[in-house]
Image (tube, grey):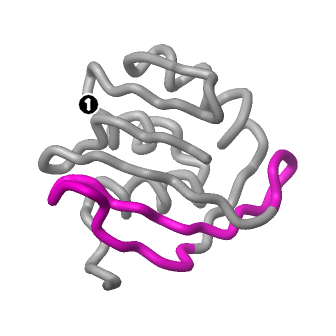
């Protein structure tokens, strides 16, 4: 069942669309992990590297299609429509959040 978008995920999407790197990185906890099809980036420095090469660095734009609760109350499965100079098309992002921060993001 669709749910309200948690602040951490809203910030992640909006910061990407505005190309606001500081706000994008602030949406993650200090020890967050991002797994992009098996390429794993750890902490804000690792996620900053992914952001430069695969996200804001590629002028990505995200349109939220759907968000549902995952297997735990703090996990959300998000379908987005991606456009930009990198990947284009639908993507599935599985977020784990704690408060206002993303602690884990798995892209498939």
The quadrant where residue 81 appears: bottom right
Q: Is residue 84 above or below residue 63?
A: above
Residue at the extreme bottom of the image, as rendered: 1
Q: Residue at x 48, y 78 (%)?
A: 66
- From the viewer's side, name the closer residue of 11 and 41: 41
Q: In the image, which residues are magenta?
A: 64-88
Q: Residue at x 50, y 25 (%)?
A: 47
| Numbered disc 1: secondary structure | strand
Query: Is residue 96 on the magenta stretch?
Result: no
Q: Is residue 91 above or below residue 56?
A: below
Q: Tell me: 51 left or right of 77.
A: right
Quadrant where the N terminus is found in the figure: bottom left
Residue at the extreme front of the image, as rendered: 71
- From the viewer's side, name the closer residue of 74 and 31: 74
- From the viewer's side, name the closer residue of 85 and 71: 71
Query: Is residue 84 on the magenta stretch?
Result: yes
Looking at the image, how many numbered discs can be counted on the residues? Answer: 1
Image coordinates for residue 32, horizontal then vertical, percent: 33, 27
- Mark 1, residue position: 29
Q: Residue at x 52, y 38 (%)?
A: 21
Q: Residue at x 53, y 74 (%)?
A: 64
Image coordinates for residue 100, horizontal then vertical, percent: 19, 50
Q: Is residue 6 above or below residue 8?
A: below
- Give the prevailing secondary structure in the magenta stretch: strand
Q: Residues within 10 Å of mark 1 (few under 14, many from 20)?
A: some
């Amino acid at each position: 069942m669709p749910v309200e978008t948690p602040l951490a995920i809203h910030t992640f999407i909006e910061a990407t669309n505005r190309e606001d790197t500081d706000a994008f990185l602030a949406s993650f906890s200090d020890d967050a992990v991002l797994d992009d099809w098996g390429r794993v980036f750890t902490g804000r420095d690792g996620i900053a590297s992914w952001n430069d090469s695969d996200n804001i660095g590629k002028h990505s734009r995200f349109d939220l299609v759907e968000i549902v609760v995952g297997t735990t109350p703090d996990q959300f499965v998000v379908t987005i429509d991606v456009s930009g100079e990198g990947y284009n098309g639908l993507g599935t992002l599985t977020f784990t959040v704690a408060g206002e921060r993303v602690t884990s993001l798995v892209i498939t």
